């Protein structure tokens, strides 16, 4: 089965549940996913796979519902620290008013609302915070498509990376899916260890904060494997601003784990004016673990689109868009527009031997072509015009080589447009030995050009003259392609 190429467009951020929803929407087999998750030795959760409409956009929602809410969807808990402290009105009128020249202060403090801050080891800063909202109806649409995944609710415990690896390895999912899941978890643990100044082995994941991540990450791995994904392109990650409450208190956005992952794996972050967290540690780890290409191909077609929803309501619609794409194959018969730079220098006081050596050095160092043209300079002195065709990035090197290996004291340069034919190289077997042939196409014609050095070598070995052998190889190459 041919590998498919995946593009994740993270202009609303990325999280674990958004990724799973988008991959399911792309066509990942729900039954394979459910069976794979059931084989995990993890309890305390159930899952629902539904359709939701956000701003009139239909998307897939993957929801991990925990026995004990870890507040990932609770906006008052996550952002309550930004609300002003409520104070009672004075009960008597005898309180003197403040002088008018004293500026007023707007105090802010975390709003706990009765929730107890859990003391944990080096846990995740917070689990996937786009995730695990209670079910809602949107725009009058009800959503009854539910995938059963209920398991027993469990108790609190701590798991380190090896414990999670053991859970993944003992499951019934494929080896490829296991490898993907373990790599994502390692990247998270690596980022958390740096944030807390601990080794990766010392990082522990609290059960309530890790169960949903185990499910989300394993689900992503199962879906990627099921879709037979090969190349993965990921856009820059759009992130919000402000602060967020987690088990370690109030942290800036992007949270330390996201910053560490982005730095280590060269993920491009685009900070927006959205107040809130758009990129979770799990989302950043998924992007880092599965990305194979940094930029999209210049030409491609979109074969399928999938949308996965987030659980938070921000000022912009929260969903991840995934696309199965196919790179457009180049048309061999088309000519290629190109831009090159041409360097020129008049040389009238340099020996032929030095000019020959300079040509060899320029070609070996990346010049596209080097040529000499006989000219006459001032005072009727015979001279040579040195021409060098090169790319823009090689300009400094080419100029250095020209000044070093010739006697010129000035170089002219100009940018020029050119058109070239697409080309490929073939090696064909002939009665006289293997011959290298350059194949070029234009419109409905194909041209075969045997390599000169190769023909010269075969001519010496066979005793045939160069012109005859060249013609024989050229004819044979055309017949073999028919």
Image (tube, rainbow, N blue to C red):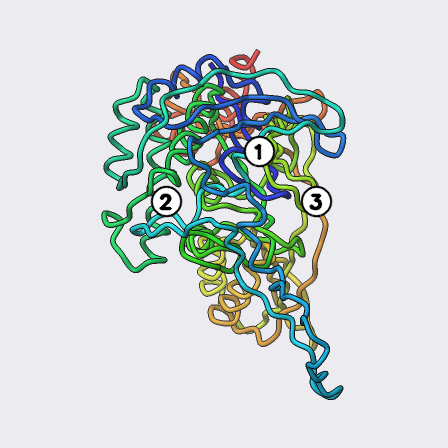
Q: What element carries label 1?
A: strand
Q: Please, is residue 314 above or below residue 376 in the view?
A: above
Cα distance in 3D space between marks 1 and 2: 21 Å
Q: Residue at x 72, y 49 (%)?
A: 417
Instruction: Give neighbour class at mark 3: few <14, some 14-19, many 20+ (Cα, 10 Å).
Output: few
Q: Which residue is drawn at 37% across and 50% down?
A: 118
In the image, residue 64 lies at what x, y percent? 48, 29
Q: How many marks?
A: 3
In the image, residue 348 lies at what x, y percent? 59, 71
In the image, residue 407 lies at what x, y percent? 52, 73
Judge left or right: residue 199 versus residue 75. Answer: left
**Mark 3 vs 1, N-terminal side:** 1
Location of mark 3 (residue): 316
Q: Please, is residue 74 above or below residue 211 in the view?
A: below
Q: Which residue is drawn at 48% across and 21% down?
A: 3
The one nearer the camera, 2 or 352, is: 2
Q: Please, is residue 71 above or below residue 364 in the view?
A: above
Q: Are marks 3 and 2 in contact (CB under 8 Å)?
A: no
Judge left or right: residue 127 versus residue 347. Answer: left
Location of mark 2 (residue): 187
**Mark 3 vs 2, N-terminal side:** 2
Judge left or right: residue 264 versus residue 394. Answer: left
In this rendering, which labeled residue sits more in front, label 3 or label 1?
3
Q: Is mark 2 on a helix, strand or loop?
A: helix
Question: Which quadrant does the C terminus fall into?
Answer: top right
Location of mark 1 (residue): 7
**Mark 1 vs 2, N-terminal side:** 1
């Amino acid at each position: 089965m041919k590998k498919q190429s995946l593009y994740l467009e993270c202009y609303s951020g990325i999280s674990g549940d958004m990724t799973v929803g988008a991959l399911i929407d792309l066509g990942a087999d729900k039954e394979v996913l459910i069976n794979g998750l059931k084989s995990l030795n993890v309890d305390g959760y159930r899952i629902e796979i539904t359709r939701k409409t956000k701003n009139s956009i239909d998307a897939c929602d993957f929801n991990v519902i925990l026995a004990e809410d870890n507040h990932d969807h609770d906006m008052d808990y996550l952002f309550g620290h930004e609300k002003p402290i409520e104070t009672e009105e004075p009960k008597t009128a005898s309180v003197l008013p403040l002088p008018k020249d004293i500026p007023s202060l707007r105090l802010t403090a975390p709003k706990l609302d009765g929730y107890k801050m859990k003391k944990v080891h080096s846990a995740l800063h917070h689990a996937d915070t786009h995730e695990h909202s209670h079910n809602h109806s949107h725009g009058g649409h009800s959503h009854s498509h539910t995938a059963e995944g209920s398991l027993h609710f469990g108790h609190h415990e701590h798991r380190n990376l090896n414990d999670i690896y053991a859970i993944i390895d003992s499951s019934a999912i494929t080896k490829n899916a296991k490898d993907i899941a373990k790599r994502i978890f390692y990247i998270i643990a690596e980022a958390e260890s740096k944030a807390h100044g601990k080794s990766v082995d010392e990082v522990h994941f609290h059960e309530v904060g890790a169960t949903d991540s185990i499910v989300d990450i394993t689900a992503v791995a199962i879906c990627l494997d099921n879709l037979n994904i090969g190349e993965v392109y990921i856009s820059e990650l759009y992130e919000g601003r402000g602060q967020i409450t987690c088990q370690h208190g109030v942290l800036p956005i992007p949270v330390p784990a996201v910053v560490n992952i982005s730095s280590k794996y060269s993920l491009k972050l685009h900070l927006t004016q959205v107040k809130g967290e758009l990129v979770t540690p799990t989302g950043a780890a998924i992007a880092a673990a599965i990305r194979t290409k940094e930029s999209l191909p210049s030409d491609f077609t979109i074969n399928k689109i999938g949308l996965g929803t987030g659980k938070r309501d921000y000022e912009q619609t929260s969903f991840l868009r995934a696309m199965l794409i196919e790179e457009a194959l180049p048309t061999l018969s088309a000519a290629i527009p190109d831009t090159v730079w041409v360097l020129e220098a008049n040389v009238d006081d340099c020996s032929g031997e030095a000019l020959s050596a300079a040509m060899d050095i320029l070609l070996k160092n990346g010049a596209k072509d080097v040529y000499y043209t006989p000219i006459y300079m001032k005072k009727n002195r015979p001279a040579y015009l040195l021409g060098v065709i090169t790319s823009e990035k090689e300009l400094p090197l080419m100029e250095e080589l020209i000044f070093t290996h010739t006697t010129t004291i000035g170089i002219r340069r100009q940018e020029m447009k050119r058109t070239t034919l697409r080309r490929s190289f073939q090696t064909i077997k002939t009665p006289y030995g293997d011959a290298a042939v350059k194949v070029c196409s234009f419109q409905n014609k194909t041209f075969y050009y045997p390599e000169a050095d190769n023909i010269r070598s075969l001519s010496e070995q066979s005793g045939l003259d160069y012109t005859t052998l060249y013609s024989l190889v050229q004819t044979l190459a055309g017949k073999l392609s028919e």
